[in-house]
Amino acid sequence: MKKLILSATAVILAGAMPCAVHAASAASATYSRAELQSMIRAARTPQQFLILSGYFRARQMYFQQQAAAEKVEWERRSQNIVGIQAKYPRPVDSSRNRYEYFTYEASQMGTQADHFEGLASARQ
């Protein structure tokens, strides 16, 4: 029964992917991890690969914006490291760690987007 439901869901998502082009291009689409994995498994056409690429590009831009905001916060916090703030973990350390996390995630999303763009161009 579970396999039937999963396969029906996969078929529905595969049929709905071309309709989702507009949502992905607007960069407002958010998918759960399960939906994203299902879309990746079901992707066969260049349009489906471009939808995935657009999603990962939007996520890359989001993480780049977060990294830029965190870099500003990191610089602000690094100007005042005295007294209680000098103890570990310092606020400047947490800002640096968040900045590094956001830049790492942005690079990962860029890699994924490049991969799906390459698959789309190879299929055309």
Image (cartoon, grey):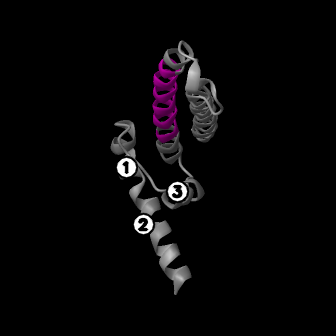
User: Is 83 in front, or is 2?
Assistant: 83
Q: Image quadrant of residue 85?
A: top right
Secondary element type, mark 1: helix
Residue 72 part of the magenta-drawn span: yes
Upstream in the sequence, badge 1 or badge 2?
A: 2
Tell me the amino acid under the disc marked 2.
Ile
For residue 11, side relative to residue 123 (left or right): left
Residue 108 x %, y %: 63, 36
Residue 39 part of the magenta-drawn span: no
Measuring 59% from the left and 58% from the top, which residue is drawn there?
41
Q: Which residue is mark 2?
A: 12
Residue 79 x %, y %: 54, 12
Spatial CA span between label 3 and label 2: 17 Å
Tell me the amino acid under the disc marked 1.
Ala
Secondary element type, mark 3: helix
Q: Which residue is mark 3?
A: 33
Is the stretch drawn in magenta largely helix, strand or loop?
helix
Q: Which residues are magenta?
A: 55-73
Q: Is disc 1 in contact with disc 2, using a CB cutoff of under 8 Å?
A: no
Measuring 46% from the left and 32% from the top, which residue is drawn there?
62
Task: Please say if 85 is above or below 9.
Answer: above
Residue 16 x %, y %: 39, 58
Q: Which residue is mark 1?
A: 20
Tell me the amino acid under the disc marked 3.
Arg
Spatial CA span between label 1 and label 2: 12 Å
For residue 104, side relative to residue 16 (left or right): right
Spatial CA span between label 1 and label 3: 17 Å
Q: Is disc 3 in contact with disc 2, using a CB cutoff of under 8 Å?
A: no
